[in-house]
Image (spheres, rainbow, N blue to C red):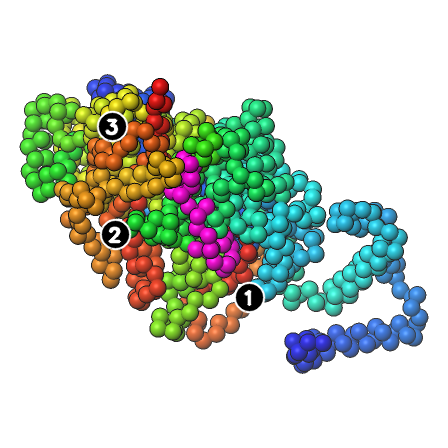
Amino acid sequence: MTSGVTGFLKRAAREPLVHFLTIGAALFVLNGLINGPDQGPESDTIIISEGRVRQIAESFVLLSGRPPSREELQALVDDFVSEEVGYREAVAMGLDADDTIVRRRMRQKIEFVIEDGAASESPTDAQLQARLDANPDIYRQPERRALRQVLLSADKRGAAARVDAEAALAQLRDGADPAKLGDGSMLPAALPLTTQDGVSAMFGAEFASAAFAHAAAQNDRDWFGPIASPFGQHVLLVIDISPGRAVALPEVVDRLRADWIEAQRNAARDAFHARMRERFKIEIEWPEPWKSLPQTPDPNPKTRPTPEVGE
Amino acid sequence: MKRLVLAVCAAALLTACGEQGEAPTSGVEQQDAAARSAPNPLNNAYFGDLHLHTRNSFDAYIFNVRASPDEAYAYAKGGTIKHATGFDMKLNSGPLDFLAVTDHSEYLGVLPAIDTPGDPYASVPYAKDLFSKDPKQVNTAFRKFGDAVRTGQRMPEFADLRTVKSAWHDIIESANRNYEPGKFTTLIGYEFTSAPEGRNLHRNVIFSGATAPELPYTALESQNPEDLWNWMEQQRAAGMESLSITHNGNGSDGTMYERTKWNGAPVDRAWAELRARNEPLAEITQVKGTSETHPLLSPNDEFAGFEIMEWYIGSTTPITKFDGGYVRKALKDGMEFQARLGANPYKFGFVGASDTHNGAGSYEEDNYHSKVGIQDASPERRGSAPPEGKDWTTYKPVDNTARFSTWGASGLTGVWAPENTREAIYAALQRKETFATSGPRIRVRFFAGYGIGASPLTSDEGVKSAYANGVAMGADLVGKADGSPDFLVMAMRDAHSAPLQRLQIVKGWVDAAGKAQEKVFDVGCSDGGTINPATHRCADNGATVDVKTCAYSQDKGDAEISAVWKDPEFDPKLNALYYVRVLENPTCRWSTWDAIRLGIEPNPALQKTIQERAYTSPIWFIPVKAS
């Protein structure tokens, strides 16, 4: 017996619950001694069915690639009997209540059952439409703009890029050909309809917000700028705007269905927990250091051993 | 509408977009049609990740990662998902253009099944230990899987492949569900996890279409990559096209690019052709370091010591053999084979990837969450902070911390393709018109050809001429009897990272004695710098980083650099290859960012700054046969 187990027994010996169980068990044993072992209801009979024995034999086949001999099977069945007896007694004594793994598995099982029930329903179009109506911003098509830009490169012109951009702006407003102005670059001279995020990914945030803040184009000479980017100074023309708009159900039906099922699962789980919690009064005795603090994620979470393969 | 549409008009759309402007369309259908622009014949740069794990990978699940393939795609599209330890992960520099989820095919989906009450696998005797709170129990139980993958022996309790089949089916379905042609491309793939004696021979297998074989071919069928290639050939004959990408080779202890076959026999022509046909690409950088070259293999390349990782995969065993683990040497060996056998097994292009096991790539130094879930989630775990109450003077890293500290925020694959569709992206991978970056979205073009030097790549006309009259990265340039080819290079910075410092061309060639050589030439300098003709180096541009704040020089470096170059040592009779390396100005390494956020000194054993970079696939010069 390890010292850990000894320590556990010592601590257990001081627990009132253990006193109660020990006395109960003693009475049970005493009763057995007085009235004989065969006494008792039918539910105490453990029947190992033919199907169960076959299953045990099949797992042996899986592991070793051959059927078990009679002796081997006998040993496996005996072990199963011990497991079953031990399990029943352990549950009867309430030993499952303090086992983290058992508790976690039971919680997983019940959540699985609850969520599965919720997810097995299929949403109607009306339910999906209601979800869309309730969350227009999530499914909205963002505004997109098509642009043309002329770059005055900071690499080539340095600080003069700004003045040169002002000059280019004046020329473009007078109808100059944009293809003949500015510096060669890998940046596209024209963009098709693009979201602000998309513009920002290539030109940076400052350029993108300027391009989207500008009032709608009046005509093909409505050039504006200069706008700075990590590449230099730009002169811009908005050539088309596709306003942000709400979407129709058919456009997002797949995404809505997936989101609806997910929401149903979450709602079913939360409702279950709320219902269960109503049956209990929950008191948490916060230790001193955490009494007034909101809960924060563990900055240095529990370690796990490194497997020697993978990554 | 993300970066794709952005890039769509590089040239052709100059007119197309103009027309749109003059005659604005209206109505939903027309607007959406306009969003899917015509393909760009001059190609756009798209960025993606071809190596990523989710909860389906046996190791990721043990690292507490629960992200699904759907969540991985959501993250790549710019969304926010949870890290294994609960914090939010989101890309700072915008969504990616494409992604392949490549879970380990061995025991695919098996760990989640063991952890699912009611699943038949939940009854394996060590199920409880696998998810125990006691690290010793977890380690003992998990070692069964590690050993089984290392030895290639399938654990008999998982002989029934229904779970693998169903997880594989879900991965395929998720890829197809998340594919948005013209906007975001998903590729079906998996990681073939061969690691004999722990030496990493992993491969990522990528399928071209919307379907894939019923089951992946795994290292539990055979650890020999030849068997994988033969299986791919069979699948191809049956109409299922795929390609294989070698995993970052630095953890292979010299076995990824060997000079012998699996059985120890010398490489022969049939083997070389089989390999080249099935493995057109090599991963050159990812979180677990870079595999371009090692300082011991390239002693004259002062930029070779970049994010070097010298350990076995998932182990603290040190690497002792670098030859055979790095791509530059392999490319040179390949040319020697070409001369001897008439076939080159190592004629590959480059890709970059994360290999993240978090379902979410960590590409940005200032937004780093490494890659193995709970194991390297905190600065202390990854060696950028000392344990609480300790300082660096007495610091000794424990367990895997030293190893994690040499990992980095990397990398991405860039492809040049006419549009963002499976067909276009796969074709670009197949023809090796690819480049790799250490994380930033540096764009780089590279062409070679005779007489193309008069039209630099600074204009669309130049790019058009280069495609028409030269060859792009990944291709062969067939020599002419006389004259020397022009090399055109142009690179553009990532608006969210530092300016560029220099363009380099790395040359490998086989000398008259049949021996492979290498040399690095600077070909373009920032800030108007000039190249010293004796050293072939740009003058130092003087860019600096303040490691107290991570602020870097604002007035140094260029947004774009272009170059037209001729090889000063060109010999038309010799086989050669050329690839481009683009260097950024120095910036803070992730470990320095971690330290600044914690208000502590950075780990003195680690580099405080790095020079992010991009590498193009090579162009091979094939001399004209003397007649």
Q: Position of residue B206 (x, y in %)?
A: 49, 34
* Residues at marks 2 and 1, CA–CA distance in whole angstroms: 55 Å
Q: Who's the residue at 85% across and 53% down the image? A: A73
Q: Secondary structure at mark 1?
A: loop
Kindly report the distance in space between the C-alpha atoms of the residues bearing marks 3 and 1.
Answer: 83 Å
Residue that appears at 28% across and 43% down: B520
* Both marks 3 and 1 on one chain: no
Image position, residue B519 (x, y; %): 30, 42
Q: Residues within 10 Å of mark 3 (few under 14, many from 20)?
A: some
| The magenta segment | B310-336
- According to the picture, the residue beneath numbered tag 2 turns out to be B586
Q: Secondary structure at mark 3?
A: loop
Q: Position of residue B609 (x, y in %)?
A: 28, 56
Residue marked by disc 3: B484
Q: Chain of mark 2?
A: B
Near-viewer residue (A209 or B207): B207
> Which residue position is annotated with label 1?
A282
